[in-house]
Image (cartoon, helix red, strand yellow):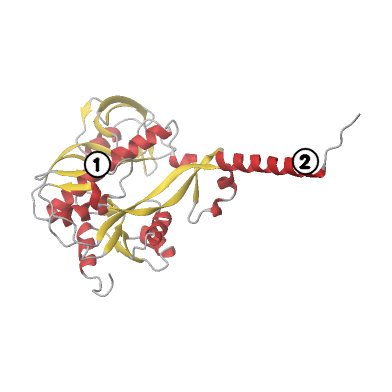
Amino acid sequence: MRRLLSPLWLALSGLGLLVVVALGLWLIPSNTYIFLPDRAHPVDPLVRVQGGHKQRGGGIYFVDIFVRKASLIERLWPGIHEGAELVPKSALLAPGVSDTQRVAADQREMTRSQQIAAAVALRAAGYRVRAQPTGALVEQVALDAPAAGKLLPTDVIVGAAGRRVRSPADLRRIVGRQRPGATIRLNVRRGSDLKRVLVRTIADPNRPKRSIIGIFVDQAASIDLPLKVKIDAGDVGGPSAGLAFALDVLEKLGKDVDHGRRIAATGQIELDGTVSAVGGLKQKTIGVRRSGIRYFLVPAGENAAEAQRFAHGVRIIPVHSFRQALRRLATLTKSAA
């Protein structure tokens, strides 16, 4: 005897199946990453300066973004989140680099950003800051370069081919003398570890007889501060909060930086005070807007142009340097608080 299924039972079964499928699409991660806006965060609770002053109103804010693997449904319809941006794995992780290594590199970038921010702020306040060159700091590794997957951002190259490296010029000179296609041994400081890394050289496209390994480097330095400065950003990584940290350190040294206003800021800061471009301006600008902050300091150029597209009432203030940021904040109209 065959039992007939009731229409109600069939409808409930179909609904249950749809719920299971929807949950799977929402919870199961894809192999693509998603960038999402986060709200702006006050810097004041994170910064301690020896003999520092209390906040007098207003405040400096930094902006982060959420980075995680997109769910299947987010991969199909990223528009369910305002400001969402899908990013392929290859654009975020170099070959052979894991999520754990990426996060660790971001944390090292944050640590360096904090040290430099403190140094720049103290110099602006008239203090003497000593910085000794310690090697060539890896800032970026080309995805198709021989160094991809072997060197990471914030690695410090302290030796190459048996010779000491104290500056980017030292590294370029040593690598450039190698024959294209040869393998060079690098001594690399990664966090507290010293590693030996073998990297094959390739010909420089612009100078075929000269070798390169496909990395962008900056000066690594040991910084000696005249005052104790402690910045605790928790699990936030990357260098983009450098400008915000420097502004807040100067505020704590008794300088009226924000002039009673809430100011959001993003930008990587260098030892000479230069403010360099960062990523995620779309998400960061939306985060500033959602936080009700009216002023947003950003690196001049493409960063500022991208921020303008999503400002919708937020005043975008492009800057090239820390000094310029201070001047721009000092000249904001008194009426806008």
Kindly identify the amino acid type of the residue bearing the numbered disc 2: Trp
| Coordinates of residue 69 in the picture (x, y in percent) | 49, 41
Q: Secondary structure at mark 1?
A: helix
The C terminus: image quadrant:
bottom left
Give the residue number, with chain letter if any, for mark 2.
9
Q: Who's the residue at 33% across and 37% down the image?
A: 105
Q: Left or right: where does residue 269 sit relative to residue 4?
A: left
User: Local crowd at mark 1 within 10 Å, few (<14), some, or many (≥20)?
Assistant: many
Above or below: residue 78 compared with residue 161: below
Q: CA distance from mark 1 to mark 2?
A: 62 Å
Residue that sits furthest to the right in the current view: 1
Residue that badge 1 annotates: 112
Q: Residue at x 31, y 49 (%)?
A: 240
Query: Can see residue 273?
Result: no
For the residue labelled by badge 2, is the local secondary structure a helix, a strand or a loop? helix
Q: Does residue 20 appear in the picture of this structure?
A: yes
Q: Tell which circle, 1 or 2, labels the residue nearer the N-terminal end.
A: 2
What amino acid type should be assigned to the residue bearing mark 1?
A: Arg
Is residue 163 shown left or right of residue 240? Answer: left
Is 7 on the left or on the right of 284, as rendered? right
Residue placed most toward the observer, 11 or 127:
11
Q: Which quarter of the figure has residue 288?
A: bottom left
